Amino acid sequence: MKKRSLKKSFGFKKPLSALLFFSAIIIGNSSFAHSYGDPTKTTTDSARKAATKELLRAFSILGQTAKIIHRHDTGETATPSVPFAFGDFSWVNGVNRQTSTLLDGPVFTPDITIDVNYTRSNRNPIDNTVVGSTALARNNEMTLNMLAFGGDFHWNNVRGRVMMQFGTRATEVPRNDYSGYKGQYDLPDAYRYLSETYVGYHWNKWHGVNLDMGIFMSYIGMFSYNNFENWSYQPSFTSDNTPWFFNGIRLQMFPTEKTKMEVWLINGWQSYAMFNKMPGIGFSWMHRPKEYISMISNNYVGTDVAGMPNCYCFHTDNSFQLRYLNRPASTNGITKAAFTLTGDFGFQSGGIYTPFGEHTASNFISGMVYHRIWFAHNHMAWNIGGGYMSNPSKYLVLIPPGQATDKFLAGATPGASFNAWDCSTTLQYMPSENITIEFEVVHRAANQDYFAGSGGVTGPDGYQNGAGIPGTSYNPNSYQPSTGTWQPDLVKSETRGVFAMICRF
């Protein structure tokens, strides 16, 4: 009888392929036998679960073996590993903690976030307006902070992302961009409902190279634009006063699975348009040598002062995050603990500004630190932290809205001091990967009147169309009956509570 070759019998070209395949079969059989034991005995639910787990492990081994066989038989080299896939970085502040995506498809991966909050200030402003925040807008009201929907397109090496945004953030963030008033076509309204939209191409070079063009999220300040990814709800001044988005071109490079480098050529610092002729130029470096360490450095230079083409802005942002405790097997106590450190430095130089002049200073020095612990099987977490910001000339301070805008800008002269600090504590409940329920207490203070007082920033009765009407409810510290004039009520500090529910699919 003629002997059949391995290739004709089983489809294997080489003996090594057959050896690997049959080894995997043996492992699978042993896993099955170990899980079920004696087949004549009744199998319990726990045994069934254990058996299922072992069988899945066996199938995984078979799948990996098949890939090895294919590469061995065809002479192909292994595909470079996905960047940062060697560890679990869901603990990092500003990173999505979800391990899977609903409705993920071969061409499109959807992304939907619903962020609703309620906040109450101890100042209880008559017009319900929050000053100095991009995460909060209205006091004493249920507020839709952000409804974001869209997702990622991926076909062969072509990539793209579209994220729409609705809610108060569609007004809070664009209003701080003065570049949109240069020229025509009303850019703040044209772009306000797009939080992130770009098209790009991926090259299979190193561990990946991407070239994207459009509006994309920045990484400055450590906190994510999507509050679902953050340890706390109200970011510290370092994050809230640095850019959430860039408009332009970015080149992402992953030379190793632990390192990402980016180069930016953009219109400016969180600006839809260019203030002057020179585009903004930036560079980002992120390194995660171990699963419990994350480091990032962002650097930017541009000419972002309207009407001052020779005034240059420089900024560097640097963050270090460390998970120093990880006990996933803990049933009742703490499962993880981590902390973050962030330091920023920047300045404007040229025209009427100097970095550190006595009467012309224009710089930005800030820092923040947060500490977080997870417990109850990672379904709950407690965070505490805060930060400090010094910004002479106020070139990065969020401008108060309403009638307070002119009052604030009148004091935003070169060398004008602005120092502020904040602290917060946050308790989060995460019953599933798709929802976060949180309660936060945050205190913020500045060296000058900045936050909304009880008289608000809109008018004597709190309404835009009721300004200057005597006899309505008003704050005697801001309304002057002798002259019949009204001034916005700003104070130096505030304490508020925040309750929020954030759902993401």
Image (cartoon, rainbow, N blue to C red):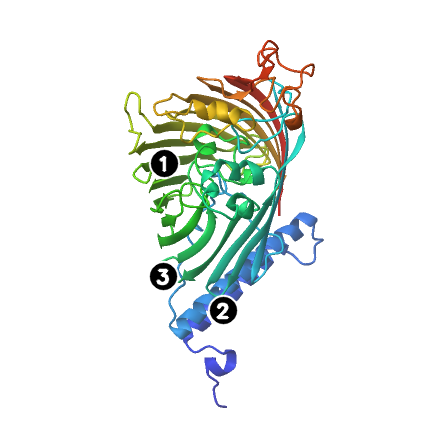
Could you give the CA–CA distance between mark 2 and mark 1, rounded to whole angstroms? 51 Å
Could you give the CA–CA distance between mark 1 and mark 3, rounded to whole angstroms? 27 Å
Q: Position of residue 262 (x, y in %)?
A: 36, 49
- The residue tagged 3 is 205
Q: Nearer the viewer, mark 3 or mark 2?
A: 3
Q: Position of residue 134 (x, y in %)?
A: 53, 33
Which of the 4 quarters of the picture holds residue 409? top left
What amino acid is found at the position of numbered circle 1 in the picture? Asn
Mark 1 in CB contact with mark 3 (< 8 angstroms):
no
- The residue tagged 1 is 318
Could you give the CA–CA distance between mark 3 and mark 2, rounded to whole angstroms? 35 Å
Q: Is residue 103 above or below residue 62?
A: above
Q: Nearer the viewer, mark 1 or mark 3?
A: 1
**Which of the two residues, 132 or 441, is positioned nearer the viewer here?**
132
Which of the 4 quarters of the picture holds residue 324? top left
Mark 3 in CB contact with mark 2 (< 8 angstroms):
no
**Which of the two residues, 173 or 186, is positioned nearer the viewer here?**
186
In the rendered view, does 153 fall on the left or right side of 346? Answer: right
The 10 Å Cα crowd at callout 2, few under 14, some 14 to 19, many 20 or more, is few
- The residue tagged 2 is 22
**Which of the two residues, 327 or 319, is positioned nearer the viewer here?**
319
The 10 Å Cα crowd at callout 3, few under 14, some 14 to 19, many 20 or more, is few
